[in-house]
Image: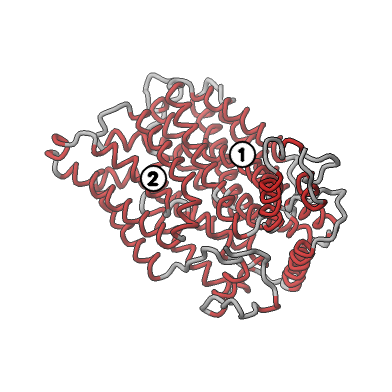
Amino acid sequence: MPSYHEDELEVLQNGKSKPDICAGIGLPPTKVAAMVTKEQEKPLGERRKAVLRQTLMVIFANSGVIGSGLAVAMPAVTLKQFQDENEPIYLNPSEASWYASINTMACPLGGMLVGYLLDKIGRKRTMLINNIIGIIGWALIAGAFQKDKESAYIQILIGRFISGVMIGLFCSPTGVYAAEITLPKIRGKLLLGTAVALSLGILSMYTIGYFIRDSWRLISTICLCYQILCFLMVIPMPESPSWLMQKGRAEDSRKSLKFFRGIDKNDFTTYDEFETEFSQIKKTSQIAANDEKQSLLTSLKEPEVYKPFLIMLGMFAFQQFSGVVVVVVYAVQIAVTAGVQMDPLLCAIFVGLGRICTTCCLGYILETWGRRPAGMVSGSGMAACMLLIAASSWFPVILQHAPFLPAVCIVLQFMFSTMGLLTLPFYMISEVFPQKVRGVASGMTVCIGLIMSFLVLKIYPTMVDALGNENIFAFYGCVALLAVFYIYFILPETKGKSLLEIEEYFKTGKFPTANQPIENEMKEVFIKK
């Protein structure tokens, strides 16, 4: 058996009382030593054990977001059954539009509550409450067995409304939690967990609807069981060290940070890097405590608050009025009206697959290209797809030569939207606001964005009747094209920047240089490679 130096043995043990012998089997001592040295050179938060812990907790946190995706996409697979006149619960066009959009009307309520809950009871407990709300919503929908159609319809609407509150509540906590437990180098990948989870939830609903086409109650029951599982997954999660410190629980904050940096609770070794980061969390929390009585309205007078607030509102406006959410909720119906010559539910599954594949690659795209290039490619691609769908309706001869063009454009539109306009606003609200208002400001931004979403979804059927599908597609394409110019001229690039550097940019109008100290002499600990 090869021999190791004490420092090598310590790394192979990885905090255990016995070394991981498997780590050295079949490898020469020089190679093992090189592996050990490479691991030791990484910051604590980027080592294998720490990354595994951070990733696992972010997965647990985002399990509930999958439930939100299920709720968002449910109308796409159940509207056909509800609009069948032979069904016990038949919905006329007006009732169907309320069924499809009422959850987005409730989302702003969740958005308004989430900031208060994040700051008052913490990230973990907020996610627990979110899942309980989701369980109640799905239970009401699944339990709508009344013979009276009106009573059942009202109960379904209440269930959809409550599910909308859950969606609004889930938009911020997971991103804030991920941002506070990770270092900048891997933060981008883990922040994408929310987008991946939402995409997975939408794809799951499309898939369930493909196999279960005539039982919305069974679909609701499956979702109810899943939401209960999500609640159980949040229970073992540690609270964010930043929030614990902000509430004066320094020892609990230290234990939490040790967990996320891969340090065992019984390891009392002093790590300079850990102590530096812990000291920074303490300083940041002290500043936040001094500003604790300052309301969001008062904070909006400060450039580091109102600038990102207005920029993110603009991003949400382009997101909603480019038809991103309309395509999600009305995917099956849009596939039919666009002239797709295949099973519309199967087309919806391809749309969901395209979105989740793009989302999984989004971490690489955003960290390699940056936020701005990804957003501009997204807007350009969406505009091209929507205008092609409109053109195929204006000039039917196109479909004679390319019958699958609408299906391809719908799938590509979803993939391009996922690359930027759909995900960037949710991605960036977790990093552009200063910590003192991060919870409230991100919640309020999402709240206003979801109000826009409700308006777009509610008026979509009316717009189709008034303007026609092809003109609606052209309108969405033009809005997506305008978004490209907005991103180019307005949106700052945050790739590779620490949260404090981003805050400094909005405060002064420029990012600090490598040798320029940030105000209060605080920088996040990370290594740029």
Q: Quadrant of the N terminus?
A: top right
Residue 497 or residue 196, whichever sits in front: 497
Image location of residue 83, percent across then percent down: 38, 28
Residue 142 sits in which quadrant?
Answer: top right
| Label 2: few (<14), some (14–19) or many (≥20) C-alpha neighbours in 10 Å | many
Residue 326, image x, y percentages: 39, 44
Q: Secondary structure at mark 1?
A: helix
In screen coordinates, is 211 left or right of 110? left
In percent of the image, x 84 and y 39: which residue is there?
18
Which amino acid type is marked by label 1?
A: Ser
Measuring 56% from the left and 37% from the top, which residue is drawn there? 158
| Callout 2 secondary element | helix
Residue nearer the viewer, 481 or 90: 481
**Can you identify the residue that label 2 sits on?**
415
Mark 1 lies on residue: 63
- Quadrant where the C terminus sits is bottom right
205 w.r.t. 521: above or below: above
Disc assigned to residue 349: none
Is 215 left, or right, of 34 in this rendering? Answer: left
Q: Considering only order in the chain, which callout, 2 or 1, is on the residue closer to the N terminus?
A: 1
Number of marks? 2
Q: Label 2 sits on what residue type?
A: Met
On screen, 292 above or below 2? below
In this rendering, the answer to whether 377 lies above or below 213 is below
Q: CA distance from mark 1 to mark 2?
A: 22 Å
Between circles 1 and 2, the one closer to the viewer is 2
